[in-house]
Image: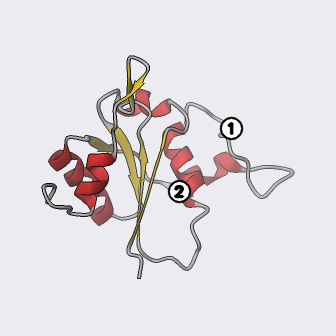
Amino acid sequence: KVDLIVDMATLTGAQLVATGKKHAGILANTEEAEKRAYDAGMRSGDLTYPLLYAPDLLKQEFASKVADMKNSVKDRGNAQTSCAGHFIESHIDASYDGGWIHVDMAGPSSKNERATGYGVGLVLALLNAPGFD
């Protein structure tokens, strides 16, 4: 049985405003999943910092007159990076009852226009791989 879903993306660039170039923003549906991601970041060096988790407050950002939902927010100043994560979360099957972590890694994923490899260590630490436990 799947007990944790992790998605990693560079969706909006708004993560840079929220958590900067060295820390990915994390959005998690439980405190346990959030702590697990934060701790994995500390162990691996792929640093993370929690974002606002408020799907009930932010879901109106996706309202559309012509579709089930739109994939961009109405108000870019309203927790845009959290909204982007909630957009992904809205596509998880409603029957799933495990943990979910969205990692917005726009900032730490590149430096001087080159990929940093950010996220590999984070995933290994989340899995408690040898050397990351």
Q: Which residue is mark 1?
A: 74
Q: Which residue is mark 2?
A: 55
Mark 2 or mark 1, which has the lower sequence index?
A: 2
What is the three-letter code of the residue carrying label 1?
Lys
Describe the element under mark 1 as helix, strand or loop: loop
- Give the image location of residue 40, x and y in percent: 22, 53
Specify the quadrant of the image occupied by residue 47. top left
Toward the right, the furthest residue is 66
Q: Residue at x 54, y 39 (%)?
A: 11
Distance from the alpha carbon under mark 2 to that under mark 1: 15 Å
Specify the quadrant of the image occupied by residue 128. bottom left
Is 27 above or below relative to 22?
below
Horizontal arrangement in the rendering, residue 34 relative to residue 106 (left or right): left
Q: The C terminus lies in which quarter of the figure? A: bottom left
What is the three-letter code of the residue carrying label 2?
Pro
**In front here: 32 or 121?**
121
Describe the element under mark 2 as helix, strand or loop: helix
**In front here: 82 or 22?**
22
